[in-house]
Image (cartoon, rainbow, N blue to C red):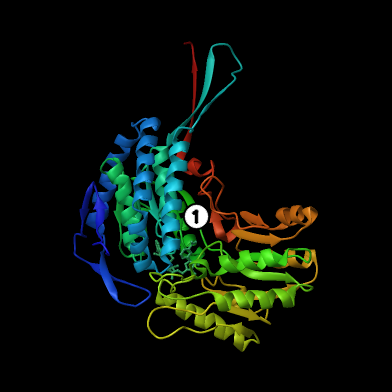
Amino acid sequence: MYPEVSLYIDGKWCKGATGRSEPILNPATEEEIGTVPHADKADLDRALAAAEKGFEQWRKVSAYDRSKIMRKAADLLRSRADAIAKVMTLEQGKPVAQSKGETLAGADVIDWFAEEARRTYGRVIPARADGIYQLVIKEPVGVVAAFTPWNFPINQAVRKISAALAAGCSIIIKGPEETPASCMELIKAYIDAGVPAGVINLVYGVPSEVSEYLIPHPIVKKVTFTGSTAVGKQLAALAGLHMKRVTMELGGHAPAIVFEDADLDTAVKILGVNKFRNGGQVCVSPTRFLVHESLYGKFVDAFTDIAKNTKVGNGLEDGMDMGPLANGRRVTAMEALVADAVTKGATVKTGGKRIGNKGYFFEPTVLTDVSDDARILHEEPFGPVAPIMPFTSFDEVVKEANRLPYGLAAYAYTNSAKTANAIGAAVESGMVSINHHGLALPEVPFGGIKDSGYGSEGGSEAIEAYLNTKFVTQAGL
Ligand code: NAD
């Protein structure tokens, strides 16, 4: 059921030139399910040459035809969603229904960018003199180097590839080594739809080796990364040194604010489901739960019930709400964050421990009495641990929400239009979702501010990152 993983360079599936590879583990069993080949410099050189050639070819394909090929890729991905979902669950762990949902959502992203391909409009600016035409033209930036992580192996990659292809760019994507096969299945859908050789190249390897080689390379004109803020800062610095266009989609620490007039049942239910979705390994996961003191006790009880009733197990089995965490590092990180919080006075309402000793399962966890200096209130947990804190006033909660350098997502629940407007304006965040969980659709902007990065990977803003604006003025026609 698990496919052989290969690199895809210049229209051919291949292994790395030096034969280096690393094992792929099923996070539910810790068993080796395959190996992922590593690209070395010779492979990256081939990918660069192919992408350069692919760009010259793809930029000449009309937007109309690019769009048609992309729509076909979306249809292929949809028709293969059941099989791809099983592959994704095997390597990433999430319940198979969520893997299928991610694959289908990926197809929606391709469709959205296929439409955007035909709308990369320029404009004509009125001139100051007769016979002068001032034209603004949008052109593809060129070869893109993209780096995507393991938490959503298809969805993190599909946004970058689709925006690049829609704009007329070619791309070298370094996919996630821990979850490589679902990303590979995504690439296959594009290839089978008719994307020419060289336009998409897929590599795996030692992340720092690949990024340090590709980012400064003169053939690469645009860099896009999704991952941690620490790595994002390094890559953005390197890109800056070489004057490359950059999109950075980095970590978050989303405040989830429940005001005194909120519909408590709705807030608990939506926040609970979204906290534990994908084991909390989501950059926009609700993270700091800030609940008005008048609702605090009830919220903690109801949220703790949700955590206790979240069914954790192998994602291939029916009825699971949460699979294992994607790798052993997350389990170690959760254990350390919980231990640190408890040492500093936190109460574990439920959870707090690894489940069993085979597979990276961790209990959905709720913490109260968390002290201000607990690490979990400063670092992105990226796991199923929810600290819940009370607040008394609007100003106090805004101060807390904006305290961290992160600014990706924020959530709020209130039945007051005035409070909804005020919190939407006051919170320092790239995205704010009020009274529902409404982020990450292809047609809406997706991105952060502050240390959460810059640029948007959704909405009509997203394609701009892959386009140069050229001004042409002409006289005397
Ligand atoms: P990490 O910081 O080592 O890696 C995060 C991602 O960046 C991985 O996909 C990795 O392959 C890639 N990466 C690391 N170093 C790189 C380099 N020098 N060049 C290019 N790519 C590089 O940590 P991790 O243990 O894999 O993940 C843990 C943290 O990463 C989480 O706590 C979370 O903050 C962040 N993360 C964020 C997202 C997101 O959606 N924004 C996704 C995955 C991980």
Q: Is mark 1 within 8 Å of ligand 1?
A: no
Residue 451 position by quadrant? bottom right
Depth order, front residue of 180/199? 180
Depth order, front residue of 173/25? 25
Taking the spot 76% from the left edge, 72% from the top edge, the residue there is 295
The answer to whether residue 213 shows anywhere in this view is: no
In the picture, the quarter occupied by the N terminus is bottom left
Using a 10 Å C-alpha cutoff, classify the residue at mark 1 as few (fewer than 14 neighbours), some (14 to 19) or many (20 or more): many
Where residue 282 appears, x then y in whole percent? 51, 64
The answer to whether residue 446 shows anywhere in this view is: yes
Q: Is residue 431 left or right of residue 160?
A: right
Where residue 302 appears, x then y in whole percent? 66, 75
User: On the image, numbered disc 1 is attached to which residue?
Assistant: 248
Residue 433 position by quadrant? bottom right
Depth order, front residue of 11/270? 270
Residue 134 in the image: above or below residue 298: above
Residue 254 in the image: above or below residue 172: below
Amino acid under disc 1: Met
Taking the spot 56% from the left edge, 47% from the top edge, the residue there is 444
Residue 420 in the image: above or below residue 443: below
Where residue 114 appears, x then y in whole percent? 43, 39
Helix, strand or loop status at disc 1: strand
Q: Is residue 341 left or right of residue 278?
A: right
